[in-house]
Amino acid sequence: MTFLSQVAAHIFQRHGTQMDNVWVIVPTRRAVSTFQQHLSQHADTPFLSPHVLAVDDFITESAGVLLIDPVSLLFELYEVFREIDPALEFGRFLNWASVLLTDFDRIDQYMISPSELFSYMTAAKALERWKLEVPDGYAPKLETTGTQRYFKLFENLQTAYLALHERLLAKGWAYRGMAYRLLAEQIEERVRDNPAYEKLYFVGFNALSRSEELIVKALVKAQKAEMLWDTDAYYMESKRQEAGKMLRMYKAAGWSGPWTWEGKHLTETRRHIQVIGVPNASMQARVANEIYGQRAGDPNAGTTALILGDETLLLPVLYSLGGSVADLNVTMGLSLQNSQLFTLVDALFEMQRTVVAFRKKDGSGTVYIPKYNHRQVIKILNHPFIRQYEQKILKTAGASPNRLIQKAVSAITTANLVYLDEQQLMTFGENNPLFAALFRRWPDDKPLAIIHQFYSLIAILKAVYAERQDAIETEYLYLFENLLHQLETTLEREERNELVTIKSLKLFLYELIRQTSIPFESEGGSALQVMGMLETRALDFDRLIILSVNEGVLPQARKLNSLIPFDACVEVGLPTYQDQESVMSYHFYRLLQRAKDVTLLYVTSAEAYGTSKGEKSRFIRQIEHELVPASAGAITISYPSVRFGQVADKKPVAVPHDSLEIPKSEAILARLHQELTGQFSTRKNRVFGGLYPTALNNFMNCSLKYYFSQVISMQKDDEVSDEMDAAEFGQWIHSTLETLDLKYRMAGEEVTAETVIEKLQEQYEKQFANRVTESGMNRLLYRVAEDLMVRFNALQQEWYGRNLDVLQTEEEWDTELLVETAIGTLPIRIAGKIDRVERLRQPDGTTLIRVADYKTGKVEARDADVKSMDILLTDSQKDKARQLWLYQYLVYKKMLQNKGLQFGNEWIDGVNTKVVAGFYSFRNLEGGFLENKLYLGTPEEFVAQTEIHLRKLVADLFDPVQPFRKTANTKICEWCEYRKLCGR
């Protein structure tokens, strides 16, 4: 028999069907419906139910007051403090107002004298408690500026507390704790002497507040009330068990009369307990669904409750249960703070907070243009609510969705737009109303305008979820809209509207969101009940699945969000975290009393709930070492392990970790053919594809990397970066050098330091127009680049004077090489983009053509210099030298084919012309031109030798017997972007 069915039988036996003026007070509204169901089973004919109320409803109804809403309460308290301190800012007030109201609530519930409490915390009392021993002739230096503010606050709190009570009572309002205090102070005239209250039963309570205790004692003493306890000998007889701490005191005091009831369910009921560790919090939902499903539909399974120690898991649990559980009741609030809608609201506030004003000069002078940071913009555009809008609304009948939002994100990332103004975003959004609702700049001093902008956004999102029919998200939207209406009504008073800035509006709104939840109501009777721990009070279930039984969750961590210090709470009789732990311990063990099948899930990960070890709750330890031995075999315990992955009857195939291979299928060989033979683009009027130095290095170092990068073209997602990375820095240097060569050196013009600085600045502004350049890492890199470029120009003039001519800059060279492959003879395009080709006049009158590649990273002479082809083709550290080798080959091949080289209008005869290749390293400028000194004989011999090796490499690339496989040299993997794909 459950506790509430026992209570129903007890009350029916006392009163029969005549219960017009009988009152049954239970801890929760969920217990109200369950009790009424049990009571209805005791009569064959209809009868009037007694007044069955949750304790909060009973208190406010009997006290004769209306509960004030949170918005109005905050403003009432603020106006009280403004009378005390007219200079108090609303934003500063909001930082501690909600904590103070919680303290006021506790003070009233526990009937604490405000004068006693607040005087205890004044400076004089602090001196007395601290017992400072000050030498003769010295005054105690207690009151610094900080301590003065601290003690002044508590001197004002009593005044504020009394003034708030007075204001609220004048309007017939009260907050929850105030209602408790009012009823406790007027219990005689309101309840005890009121004939409407014939008999009251207080059912299933544990730790009573002082006000509750005064109310109950007065009624019990007058023989108008009876306490019906639900206790167990296991924790009542042991002073060590914290679950019975308060109940043992009540029983010993004897004021509640005969102790009704105390059983031995915990130690004598036969039950099995499973304790299961799960890797992370959200996986508990999946495990709980599996455990429930094992006995779903079993007529002997009885009632089942899925209890959430961590109530933020409600959504994961509901989605995990999905359509597999049709008979389900939820008895707890779904917090608006834990919704996706809140994350969108939070992202909008963060975007507005991080706005940067950019200076711009126009005809009227300097103006400041506010711009949003790309991080917040992209976060908002990628938000699930916004993507749902794209999926459901931006489409025409029978057509696929318009990818407006995806195109906007792509445009931002492709152009690397770090900061964006409102007009840019509206252009990307094609003036869609959603973009206007999201990206209009908020005025700092007009909170109502911000609220109206939220209304516009809600109206747009409602259309999405009306079509999608997502009940939870739709309810969140309506809740948020109602909250905004409430806030708007309160702010419409002119003096209040002027108080609120964006910052204080955010604080205010977030506090209201924290207090707001979807109030799921349950009528009971479903096969599965989902609820929080507090909703289980007075209820019993045959089968329990309890989640998050971790230390710090059940029970909660030892902290109390309060302005009142621990020693003051102890002194005046306010509850501390120790009392909270005792209360939670009672709820836990009382829930276990009549259960026959219990599963306790806890999280094992080191980061679980802020603990250092993923520590299981002390409740589990107590069960293992105290309850199980005390049960004398009635309780059994097991520790099943959880494995996620393939279905049991499908045996996974073991694959050696280091043997990842991709065979060369016909489709892959066809792709290689297409990639390496080169294709002509009429649109771009150029040939693309072929074997480039980077691709060749990838293949020779790790053929699997070649597969990822060239065959399937796997690229990293574009990301916007505030700071330039190494590639962007190199691109900026390259583009500046190209400009200087084309416009000056190749035109015969002198390049001065001033010219270098000017062109560097031009290219910087062109490439990084949407970044903050006046400070930070970007500014530092600019100074580095300026220094390097000026030094490079000076060294070139010092070393070579007028003997060095730039012939070409940033041009692509290519040639065709016939290769015998497994799929036939193919014309392979060998290509490379050469940074600079220059001519150095030698003292003996011969011409030296130098193929130069710029490196903004550090390159040493040994990186370019290779003594033999064997080293070049086998050493993975020689990838830079292989690049120079191919460049040198391309120039020699062209020179031999054409009997010379054509650069613009200038012809260079191939006779007595030597070609060398090397690097300019901008982190090793003093090293000069770092030349590859690989000697393969005459130009003809160089080309012939090179083509022998290239044909062999290309043939290997097309060989179907040689799969793409990852390298055995793990040093190559250190900076590889694909290392995670192959487990390195």
Image (cartoon, helix red, strand yellow):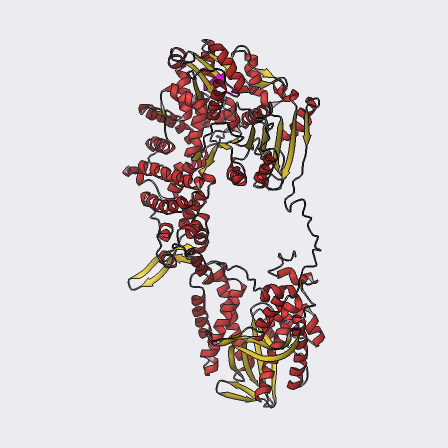
Percent x, y of residue 179 = 40, 22
Of residues 595 and 842, the one drawn nearer to the viewer in this rendering: 595
Is 488 magenta? The answer is: no
Of residues 385 and 903, the one drawn nearer to the viewer in this rendering: 385
Percent x, y of residue 292 = 59, 34
Judged left or right of residue 866, residue 524 is left
Is the residue 265 above or below the residue 768 in the image?
A: above
Q: Is residue 280 visible?
A: yes
Of residues 479 and 819, the one drawn nearer to the viewer in this rendering: 819
User: Which quarter of the rendered picture does the N terminus lie within?
Assistant: top right
Q: How many numbered badges does the structure rendering display?
A: 0
Is 205 magenta? The answer is: yes
Q: Is residue 928 visible?
A: no
User: Which quarter of the rendered picture does the C terminus lie within?
Assistant: bottom right
Is the residue 455 above or below the residue 595 in the image?
A: below
Q: Residue furthest top?
A: 222
Is the residue 817 above or below the residue 764 in the image?
A: below
Percent x, y of residue 530 = 52, 32
Is the residue 913 above or below the residue 121 in the image?
A: below
Which residues are drawn in magenta?
202-212
Percent x, y of residue 942 = 66, 82
Report which quarter residue 592 is drawn in. Answer: top right
Q: Residue furthest front?
A: 44
Identified at 43% across, 11% down, the residue is 18
